[in-house]
Image: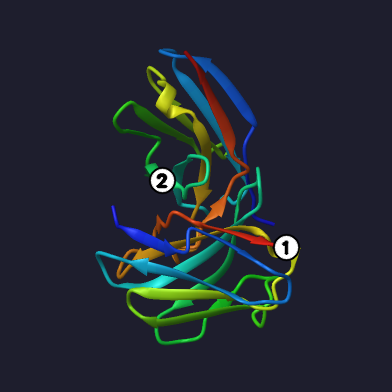
């Protein structure tokens, strides 16, 4: 399978600040990446699809101005949580989709965000 | 709307026994399913997948069964080991886009 990294693995920030999370595809070029959010003891919920060189597409109910996604290269997508609030505290996980593979993805290790 | 659900939130088994984790899906158009294992604090790890043109697929110690008639998916783990303890999710991809819809998850506890 593919190797996907995320940075940081965990972060604590204060309410009102912004936090950037990176997702890197280490061994192949990923034209598409996905961002998921997972609250404690719950399932993964898709937030948005990150497309290299174009705007991200967001799932219904996800605020695009709050969760900024940038997919500037074939190996890096970033998710910025702007003006974070305690309710944004969650586990954020990215997955990558190798070019030509439309059927599934490989997941990163996740980033634990805690907003105080 | 679309949903993928699980019948049992927690499954406790004895080491060495076989485990069966179930999943129901509602989108009859779904044609690809994946089982993931997620350990605490980590991202999901791919276990096995199956396409809708198959009823059964086997991997190493794992078997996935698909019953399209009743829209049911199951994961069987043979000779369950303590290292199998984790949360297991089924996921569905019916749109050929890579977007995955996850089920609720089942916690598997393996007793030594």
Lateral position of residue A51 relative to residue B103, left or right = left
Residue drawn at (41%, 27%) of the image? B83
Q: In x, y percent, where is residue B24?
A: 60, 39
**1 vs 2, front mark:** 1
Residue that numbered label 2 is attached to: B45
- Note whether B20 is above or below B47 in the view shown: above
Q: In x, y percent, where is residue B41?
A: 52, 46
Asked whether residue B16 appears in the rendered view, the answer is: yes
Residue that numbered label 1 is attached to: A116
Q: Which secondary structure, mark 2?
A: strand
Q: Quadrant of residue B61?
A: top left
Considering the image in quadrants, where does the C terminus of chain A appear? bottom right
- Note whether B24 is above or below B100 in the view shown: above
Residue drawn at (44%, 14%) of the image? B15
Lateral position of residue B26 relative to residue B56, left or right = right
Q: Which secondary structure, mark 1?
A: loop
Asked whether residue B70 appears in the rendered view, the answer is: no
- Viewer-nearest residue: A111 or B85: A111
Label 2 marks a residue whose chain is: B
Residue drawn at (66%, 52%) of the image? A39
Lateral position of residue A48 relative to residue B46, left or right = right
């Amino acid at each position: 399978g593919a190797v996907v990294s995320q940075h940081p693995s965990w972060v604590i920030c204060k309410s009102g600040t912004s936090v950037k999370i990176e997702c890197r595809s280490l061994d192949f070029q990923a034209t598409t990446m996905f961002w998921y959010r997972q609250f404690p003891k719950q399932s993964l919920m898709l937030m948005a699809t990150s497309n290299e060189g174009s705007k991200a597409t967001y799932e219904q109910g996800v605020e695009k101005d709050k969760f900024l996604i940038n997919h500037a290269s074939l190996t890096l997508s970033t998710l910025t949580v702007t003006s974070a609030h305690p309710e944004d505290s969650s586990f954020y996980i990215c997955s990558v989709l190798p070019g030509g593979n439309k059927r599934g993805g490989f997941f990163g290790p996740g980033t634990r965000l805690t907003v105080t | 709307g679309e949903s993928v659900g699980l019948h049992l939130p927690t499954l406790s088994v004895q080491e060495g026994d076989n485990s069966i984790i179930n999943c129901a899906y509602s989108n009859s158009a779904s044609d690809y399913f994946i089982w993931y294992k997620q350990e605490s604090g980590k991202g999901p790890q791919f276990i096995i997948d199956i396409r809708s043109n198959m009823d059964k697929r086997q991997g190493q110690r794992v078997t996935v069964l698909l019953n399209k008639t009743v829209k049911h998916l199951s994961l069987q783990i043979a000779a369950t080991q303590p290292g199998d303890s984790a949360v297991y999710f089924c996921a569905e991809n019916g749109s050929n886009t890579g977007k995955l819809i996850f089920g609720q998850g089942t916690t598997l506890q393996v007793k030594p």
